[in-house]
Image (spheres, rainbow, N blue to C red):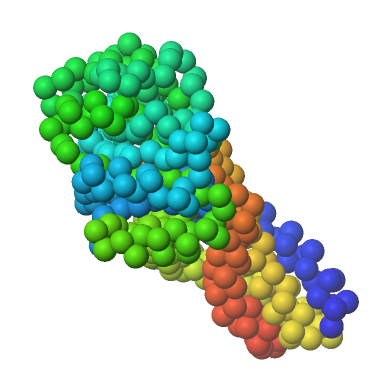
C-alpha cells in the first residue's frame, strides 16, 4: 500500500501546475482564512501580553470594596493614609512604605489621524518610582510634585501629537505641560500619562483616591495583608495581587477577539472549503483516465484516495503559507489600540510560531474537508467507465 501511495503521489502533485486557475482560487481562499484568524488571535495575544506584563506578583492593588476597577473606585483620603500604615507593606531604606495612592483622569485628545481618542492620566505619588523601577525616562525629565507637569508613555507618542515634549493639555481649567516621556517594559502604563496625584486631585476638585498600589515582601504575604484589612471594619476595601488584577482586565477583550476570529474564520472557511471541493472535483475529473489506468494495472483504492487527499492538503498548506506570510509582513509588530475600562490600551501585535501552527491546523482542516469527498470519489471510480473516457 505504502509503495503504491508513494508511486502515485508525485504524479498527482505534478498535475497541480496544470490547473493554475482553480488551484490559485483554493490557495487564496485558504490564505484569507488563515490570515484573518492569525491576525485576530495575534491581537488577542498582544493585548494579553501587554496587561500581563503590567502587574507584579509581589504588588497588591487596593480598591474600594465591590469596585470592579479603578474607574469606579473611591478611597477617601483618610482611609488611603491609614492603608499606608499597614505593617505588611514593604519599606524602603528610609523606612517609608513603598506604595502609591493613585487616581485617574480621562482626557479626549485628537489623534494624528484626526479622530478623537481617550487617554488616561494617572496621578501617582513620588514613591511610585521606587514601586515601579521599570519606568525609565526616554527624553525630558520627571514631573515635579506640586506642579502641573506630565510625562507621557512611549506608546502614546506616535498617536497623539499634542503629547510630545513641550506640548500642553488642559485638565479642567488648568493647563499642564509635557516635560518628558517614558518607557516601562511594554506594559499598560506606556499607554498612560503620569503626573502628581495631589496636583491632579486639586485640579479636578476631588478629595479621594481611586486605588492604592503597594509592594509586599513576597506574594505569600497577601493572605496576612488581607487578614489585617479584615479586622478593621472601617477599611471598606478589597485587595488583590496586581498581576492577577491586570490579567483579569484582559479576559473580556481576549474573549471578544477570539470569538470574532473563530466566527469570521468559520464563515470564510466555508467558502474556502467550497473552493477546495470544486478544485478537487475538477482535478479528479481531469485525472480520471490516469486513475483508471493505475487501478487497471493493480493499484488499490486506498493509495489513490490518499494521494488525492494529499493534493488537497498540499494546496491548503500553500494557502496557509501565503496567509501567514502576508499577516507577518503586514501586521507583525504593528501597534494596535483597544479600549479597556474607558481607556485606550496600545499594544503590539505578535505573530508567534504557535499562532502560525494554529493557522496551519485551520488550513489542514479545510483541506481535509474539501478534499475528502473527491478523494473517495476517485477511489471508487469505476475502472471500465473511466477507461472509456480516455
Left or right placement of residue 127 versus residue 285 in this view: left
Given residues 375 and 339, the one toward you in this image is: 339
Residue at 41 percent of width and 37 percent of height: 189
Q: Is residue 14 above or below residue 174?
A: below
Given residues 105 and 273, the one toward you in this image is: 105
Given residues 258 and 281, the one toward you in this image is: 258
Given residues 128 and 89, the one toward you in this image is: 89
Q: Position of residue 203 (x, y in %)?
A: 17, 27
The quarter in which the C terminus is drawn is bottom right
Q: Position of residue 298 (x, y in %)?
A: 84, 85
Left or right placement of residue 12 versus residue 95 in this view: right
Residue at 27 percent of width and 57 percent of height: 235
Which residue is farthest right?
Answer: 3
* Residue 9, picture quadrant: bottom right
Q: Is residue 232 above or below residue 330?
A: below
Q: Is residue 63 above or below residue 295?
A: above
Residue 65 visible in the picture: no
Q: Is residue 98 above or below residue 273?
A: above
Amino acid at each position: 500500500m505504502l509503495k503504491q501511495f508513494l508511486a502515485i503521489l508525485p504524479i498527482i502533485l505534478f498535475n497541480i501546475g496544470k490547473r493554475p486557475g482553480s488551484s490559485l482560487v483554493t490557495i487564496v481562499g485558504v490564505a484569507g482564512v488563515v490570515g484573518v484568524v492569525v491576525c485576530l488571535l495575534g491581537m488577542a495575544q498582544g493585548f494579553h501580553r501587554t496587561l500581563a506584563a503590567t502587574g507584579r506578583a509581589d504588588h497588591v492593588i487596593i480598591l474600594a470594596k465591590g469596585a470592579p476597577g479603578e474607574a469606579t473606585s473611591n478611597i477617601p483620603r483618610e482611609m488611603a493614609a491609614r492603608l499606608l500604615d499597614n505593617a505588611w507593606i514593604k519599606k524602603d531604606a528610609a523606612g517609608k512604605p513603598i506604595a502609591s495612592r493613585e487616581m485617574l483622569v480621562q482626557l479626549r485628545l485628537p489623534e494624528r489621524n484626526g479622530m478623537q481618542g481617550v487617554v488616561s492620566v494617572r496621578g501617582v505619588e513620588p514613591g511610585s518610582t521606587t514601586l515601579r523601577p521599570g519606568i525609565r525616562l526616554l527624553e525630558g525629565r520627571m514631573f515635579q510634585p506640586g506642579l502641573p507637569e506630565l510625562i507621557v508613555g512611549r506608546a502614546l507618542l506616535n498617536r497623539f501629537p499634542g503629547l510630545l515634549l513641550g506640548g500642553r493639555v488642559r485638565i479642567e481649567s488648568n493647563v499642564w505641560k509635557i516635560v518628558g516621556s517614558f518607557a516601562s517594559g511594554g506594559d499598560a502604563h506606556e499607554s498612560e500619562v503620569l503626573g502628581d496625584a495631589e496636583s491632579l486631585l486639586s485640579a479636578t476638585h476631588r478629595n479621594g483616591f481611586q486605588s492604592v498600589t503597594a509592594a509586599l515582601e513576597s506574594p505569600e504575604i497577601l493572605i496576612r495583608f488581607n487578614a489585617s484589612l479584615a479586622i478593621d471594619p472601617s477599611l471598606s476595601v478589597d485587595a488583590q495581587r496586581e498581576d492577577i488584577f491586570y490579567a483579569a482586565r484582559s479576559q473580556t477583550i481576549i474573549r471578544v477577539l477570539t470569538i470574532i476570529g473563530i466566527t469570521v474564520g468559520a464563515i470564510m472557511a466555508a467558502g474556502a472549503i467550497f473552493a477546495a471541493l470544486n478544485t478537487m472535483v475538477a482535478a479528479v475529473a481531469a485525472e480520471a483516465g490516469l486513475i483508471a489506468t493505475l487501478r487497471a494495472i493493480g493499484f488499490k483504492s486506498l493509495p489513490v484516495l490518499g494521494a488525492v487527499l494529499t493534493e488537497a492538503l498540499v494546496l491548503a498548506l500553500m494557502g496557509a503559507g501565503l496567509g501567514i506570510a502576508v499577516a507577518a509582513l503586514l501586521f507583525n509588530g504593528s501597534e494596535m489600540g483597544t479600549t479597556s475600562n474607558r481607556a485606550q490600551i496600545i499594544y503590539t501585535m505578535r505573530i508567534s510560531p504557535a499562532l502560525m501552527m494554529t493557522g496551519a491546523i485551520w488550513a489542514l482542516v479545510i483541506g481535509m474537508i474539501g478534499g475528502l469527498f473527491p478523494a473517495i470519489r476517485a477511489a471508487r471510480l469505476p475502472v471500465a467507465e473511466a477507461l472509456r473516457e480516455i
